[in-house]
């Protein structure tokens, strides 16, 4: 029985450790900052990287250790922001701060380099101070259309996250897109076909668990459930 408990505990710890460096988050450093211990994002984590438009940034994982991943912005014409955001949100997160500042541009690019994850999703957040501005966000393979939400994304007690999944010209009201199942060490995203100023507000690179890791986590969960049922008898 002691061996069983030890194995279960080990599996549980392994599952948690595998998630410790599974997310890299960045927000444009203009407006209200996100504190190191503040949770933010659709994938809600702490230790957001905050960097502006000058040069490139070296990004850290969600446990604050260096990832080696780089980020650079090009094609923009300066800082911009909504300027109406108070932090934190009503629910204690800092989601509105993501959209408060952005790299204002029409036709800008955000490039990521030296991504260590083998397979990952990238959440791209975009913002504007006015609603109804149409544009597209693309990784060169998949292109999503959107219409900016403006202050509506941040005017309530909590930020509104609205994802675009439109790959045509529907231009739904949205403030982020997800590019799923990406591989390779570098990616470039472009905002184009924009009717006026808007820009990149943030990104999250989220590791997709390897099949072996997922199986290990499932085994650990099943073992814990089994032991709990046994102990209740």
Image (cartoon, helix red, strand yellow):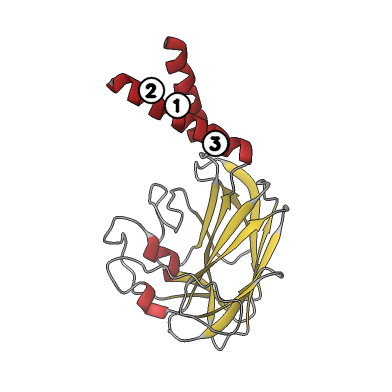
> Which residue sits furthest front?
233
Q: Which element is circle 3 on?
A: helix
Q: Quadrant of the N terminus?
A: top left
Q: Residues within 10 Å of mark 2 (few under 14, many from 20)?
A: some
Q: Which element is circle 2 on?
A: helix
Q: CA distance from mark 3 to mark 1?
A: 18 Å
From the viewer's side, name the closer residue of 107 and 173. 173
Q: Are marks 1 and 2 in contact (CB under 8 Å)?
A: yes
> Which residue sits furthest top?
2
How far across and down, in percent of the image, does residue 36 sit?
42, 48
Q: Which element is circle 1 on?
A: helix
Quadrant hosting residue 40: bottom left
From the viewer's side, name the closer residue of 190 and 144. 144
Quadrant hosting residue 89: bottom left
Q: Are marks 3 and 2 in contact (CB under 8 Å)?
A: no
Mark in front: 3 vs 1: 1
Instruction: Look at mark 3 in the image and give the residue it sits on.
Output: 18
Q: CA distance from mark 3 to mark 2?
A: 23 Å
x 51%, y 34%: residue? 217
Give above or below for 22 relative to 168.
above
Instruction: Look at mark 1 in the image and give the residue it sits on.
Output: 223
Instruction: Look at mark 2 in the image and give the residue it sits on.
Output: 227
- Report the side of 201 relative to 230 (left or right): right
- Report the side of 64 relative to 121 (left or right): left
- Mark 3 or 1, nearer chain start: 3
x 54%, y 75%: residue? 199
From the viewer's side, name the closer residue of 230 and 96. 230
């Amino acid at each position: 029985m002691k061996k069983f408990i030890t194995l279960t505990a080990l599996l549980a710890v392994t599952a948690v450790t595998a998630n410790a460096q599974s997310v890299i988050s960045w927000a444009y450093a203009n407006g209200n900052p996100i504190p190191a211990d503040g949770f933010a994002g659709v994938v809600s984590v702490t230790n957001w990287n905050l960097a502006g438009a000058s040069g490139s940034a070296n990004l850290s994982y969600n446990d604050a250790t260096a990832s080696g991943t780089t980020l650079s912005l090009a094609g923009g014409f300066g800082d911009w922001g909504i300027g109406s955001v108070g932090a934190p949100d009503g629910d204690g997160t800092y989601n509105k701060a993501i959209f408060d500042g952005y790299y204002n541009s029409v036709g800008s690019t955000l490039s990521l380099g030296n991504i260590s994850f083998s397979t990952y999703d990238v959440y791209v957040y975009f913002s504007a101070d006015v609603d109804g501005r149409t544009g597209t966000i693309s990784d060169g393979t998949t292109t999503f259309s959107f219409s900016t939400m403006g202050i509506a994304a941040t005017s309530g007690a909590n930020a509104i996250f609205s994802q675009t999944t439109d790959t045509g010209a529907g231009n739904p009201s949205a403030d982020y897109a997800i590019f799923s199942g990406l591989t390779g060490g570098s990616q470039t995203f472009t905002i184009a076909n924009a009717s006026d100023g808007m820009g990149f507000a943030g990104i999250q690179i989220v590791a997709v668990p390897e099949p072996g890791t997922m199986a290990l986590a499932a085994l650990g969960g099943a073992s814990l459930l089994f032991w709990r049922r046994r102990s209740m008898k």
